[in-house]
Image (cartoon, rainbow, N blue to C red):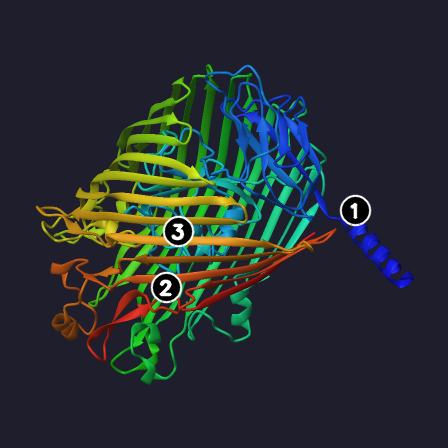
Amino acid sequence: MKNMLTLLFGCFYFFASQAQNSPTQTIRGKVVDKASQMPLIGVVVMVAETDLNTTTDLDGNFILSNVPIGRQVITTQYLGYEPYSTEGLVISSSKEAYLEIGLIEQVEVTETVVVTASGGKDGVGNQAINDLSVVSARSFSVEETKRYAASIDDPGRMAAALPGIQTDQDNENDVVIRGNSAFGVLWRMEGLEIPNPSHFGRPGTTGGGISVFSASVIGNTDLSTGGFAAEYGNALSGVFDMRNRRGNMVNREHSVKIGLIGLGASTEGPIKKGRSSYLVNYRYSTLGLLNAMGLYVVRENVGNNFMDLSFNLTFNSKDNKDEFKIFGIGGLSDERWFTKEDTADWQTYLDYIDERNGSNLGVLGFTYRRLINEKSYLKVVVGSVLNHIFLKQAIPNLTTLDIEDKNVVEDYDYKTLRSQLHLTYSNKISNRFRLKTGASLTANTYWLNYSKDLGNGDYTYLDNIHGNTFLLQAYAQGSYRPVKKLMFNFGFHALFLTLNNTYSIEPRLSIQYKPFENTTFSAAYGLHGKVLPIGTYLLQLPNGNGSITQPNKDLEIAKAHHAILSFQQIIGLGFRLNLEGYYQYTFDNPTSTIPNSGYWFFNERDNYGTREMISEGQGQNYGVDLSVEKAFSRSFFVLVTGSLFWSQYKSLGDTEWRRTRIDKRWGTSVMGGYEFTFKKGGVLQIGLKSFLSGGLRYTPADFEASKLAGQLVEDTNQYWGASAGTYFRLDGRVAYRKDHKKFSYTISLDVQNITNTKNPRYFIYDRQEITLIPRYQSGLLPVISFQIDF
């Protein structure tokens, strides 16, 4: 009995001490009026389903201490403002959480506030940060990007499972929205436009191998897939509006990550405690290290490498009316293809090619925001973005099979420097009406070289072209809420390109109506314009007398009408049904000057084009997107999407619509995840993601002409007339997170294409068999990583 009592007492003491020492964390943040950015004093901030709460101080700041680690929902209540609730935030023992909360003022003010910390578990989440984006828009966090199976911290890959977005290439992160070319996507960081934010980027598009953005530095992102708010210009198909996370202004925190994609380290902390902070992350490609050891993952004759550095510095004035940020990104990437030494293995050009390609990116930006008064603020963004994309491709003599006798078949080197100034003024005139205006000036300096072997000698399409041009943009947008249930947004965006004095004036209108608390109807119309890639305008071609001309210099800005109808219903337990129908009509699209040629510039995946074009092409995309989503709560999340869509075009002289390269007609994705929380504090996360859609489209070969030419000759009478069949991919994720008193760690395994399904990426001409053979996308690809935070 004495031994039993001793044992029971010992167990009681152990568990009591464990309970006393259970890790907790501090949550800091700031609450502001979303429209005016003015700090709100006395806002009640609570941890849902606990007794923990606090109020904001004179500067809108708050501190929640001793918050239990794990998933927590933070809610706010404030007289005259709509209640706010976060999704389930991961609170770890190693890193303090910081929240920037913007509250929307009520149109019809209630007289009392009932303070309660219950609820929060069934929030639908994912509402756009920009409240002027009311249709086809949502936000996502870095934690959400990590949670989606096989997204590998890449916003582009993560977005592939969202409504209206179709998968295009497993090996790359192109974002294909509602049948539009990936060229039409706008990427912005803190208001600064970044033309191609990817390692291994390609010219004339916005996609590449993997994002250059660091998951340790970026914060929440808004994604718009149509009917954009008036402030978003120079975009046809979608907008990623990204923000940097600020570093911890009180304590220093660090992180180290080791994985198949890269080795990374980040650090953050105060520069002047409570007033300023730094946040820095560096990443180096693991593939580069493996290549140095003679191990090649992508292909036996392919080596690649990349690295990037990101930082964000934040400074606040003593009175908190001024905020100043300095941010930057530097990225280097290159890939090398080696000719196989055994000529018996030369089946396709992938076996005998000798190539080096890659891309470099440099971003440096400054933002300054001044709170003018309780109703308005001014924001200034200044920055520069340097893009360098290059390729040199050679093949050996295929007649003599001499490896050393190589001929350069394609060679380009593109450098662009975009220097930008962006001004924004916002005024909340009343709780019903808000006005937001802005203007930007972009100076684009370029250095372009491009030559290609046409079979009868080299031709130079861009011969040391150097110069500069300017893009001017301006917008104004008003938002009016006559009653609580109804909101009107109206405005315009204007573009002017000095290179050829072309312009686009674009009206925008959206309406949101909430007849019931859980029901929302929305509609939007907008005209959207996109400046073509600079090299497309400057293409050099010979004319009849042997001189060189630039026939594409007067091409118009490509434009598209967007019309969208949306219905959203919250079903219960956090489930949200969203149904959207849309129609897009594009015009002033570049197409060949030869009637009925079938050539349409937006069918190209990349580059600037190699032929004379005219702005007489047309396109139309229409369809329906359906999604059922449950944001993360009650330990799980679900997202099911389905799309029916048609993507068609007309080249010069066409009387019938043709199918575009992206016209898959249908697609669906199913994704979900569950978290198991153990009594000792560990968390096991399991997730799955699947895609099923129409297959890759391609142009069949003219085999007789190909045999005579000794290389692929496409059947131009059947542009994009063939399909590779149904596309299917299943991804999975398993991760384990554990918190200790001073540090936490996460080990994860993401697997892309668990079933190793052979989905064609494109088709290659086999010179031996005189046939097309598929080059497949990534097969089974496991990505393991280990991260420790301290």
Residue 732 image point, x, y percent: 47, 61
Q: Is residue 558 visible?
A: no
Per the image, label 3 sits on a secondary structure element best described as loop
Residue at (22, 48) in percent of width and height: 647
Contact flag, marks 1 and 2 (Cβ < 8 Å): no
- Image location (x, y in percent) of residue 528: 29, 35
Amino acid type at circle 2 is Lys
**Disc 2, SS:** strand
Q: Amino acid at mark 3?
A: Ala
Q: Quadrant of the N terminus?
A: bottom right
For label 3, the residue is 161
N-terminal of the two: label 3 or label 1?
1
Task: Point out the tag, 2 or 3, that comes first from the N-terminus.
Answer: 3
Taking depth in this image into account, of 725 and 689 the one nearest to the observer is 689
Numbered marks: total: 3
Mark 1 or mark 2, whichever is nearer to me? 1
- Structural crowding at the residue carrying mark 3, measured as other residues with C-alpha within 10 Å and reported as few (<14), some (14–19) or many (≥20): many
Please name the residue that numbered disc 1 is placed on: 20
Q: Nearer the viewer, mark 3 or mark 1?
A: 1
First in residue order: circle 1 vs circle 2: 1
Q: Which mark is residue 392?
A: 2
